[in-house]
Image (tube, rainbow, N blue to C red):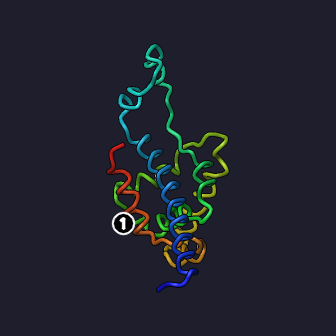
Amino acid sequence: MCPAHCHLRLLILLALLVGVLYCLHLLVKDYQALTAPRLLRMLFKRDTNSMNESISAWTPHVRWRMILHHDPIQCARYLYCELGATNIKHTDLQRGFVYMLSLEPKELDRTSRDVFLQAYNYGATYKNGGYCRNEFPYCPFDYTLLFQLIEYLINQKD
């Protein structure tokens, strides 16, 4: 039988996983919004009168501030650091997540995006995931698992 502290550890780990999943969910939704065809994005708009104007005026953005706010254990930052460290062998999905860093952020998101860009550059400088793990030690999950979760979330239908 497991003592009470084992149950407490399990509950804490589950709570951390829920937080990480929400943070990854935000990243995935922004990635999907950036990669969806423009026509599909406009199908869900309510104002059809300005649809043509909306299509031409729409600029993609990532909600970096919200993602950073929901990343207290630094798993999203760890993910971007690892992306920088492994930038030679990226999949299309990983390249898409790196591309998100190059988009011009809204003013509200600028400093938060810079945090993720700094994590990516840190990984790119050292080219070693071990440095990323030392820089972001609070994330209890492995880079491979994080991307498996992202792929799972992308392949799920709403």
Q: Where 145 falls versus 38 (above or below)?
A: below
Q: Residue at x 63, y 58 (%)?
A: 115
Q: Residue at x 62, y 40 (%)?
A: 106
Compare residues 109 and 148 and report the one nearer the observer: 148
In the picture, measured across the screen, residue 52 lies left or right of residue 112, that is left
Q: Position of residue 94 (x, y in %)?
A: 40, 58
Callout 1: helix, strand or loop?
Answer: loop
Q: Position of residue 149 (x, y in %)?
A: 40, 60
Compare residues 63 and 86 and report the one nearer the observer: 63
Q: Position of residue 71 (x, y in %)?
A: 59, 59
* Quadrant housing the C terminus: top left
In the picture, measured across the screen, residue 127 lies left or right of residue 117, that is left
Amino acid type shown at disc 1: Lys
Residue reaching furthest to the top:
49
Numbered disc total: 1
Q: Position of residue 98 (x, y in %)?
A: 47, 55
For disc 1, the marked residue is 89
Q: Residue at x 58, y 63 (%)?
A: 119
Q: Where 39 falls versus 30 (above or below)?
A: above
Q: Residue at x 41, y 51 (%)?
A: 96
Q: Where 116 falls versus 41 (above or below)?
A: below
- The local crowd at label 1, few if under 14, some if 14 to 19, many if 20 or more residues have their Cα within 10 Å, is few
Residue reaching furthest to the front:
1
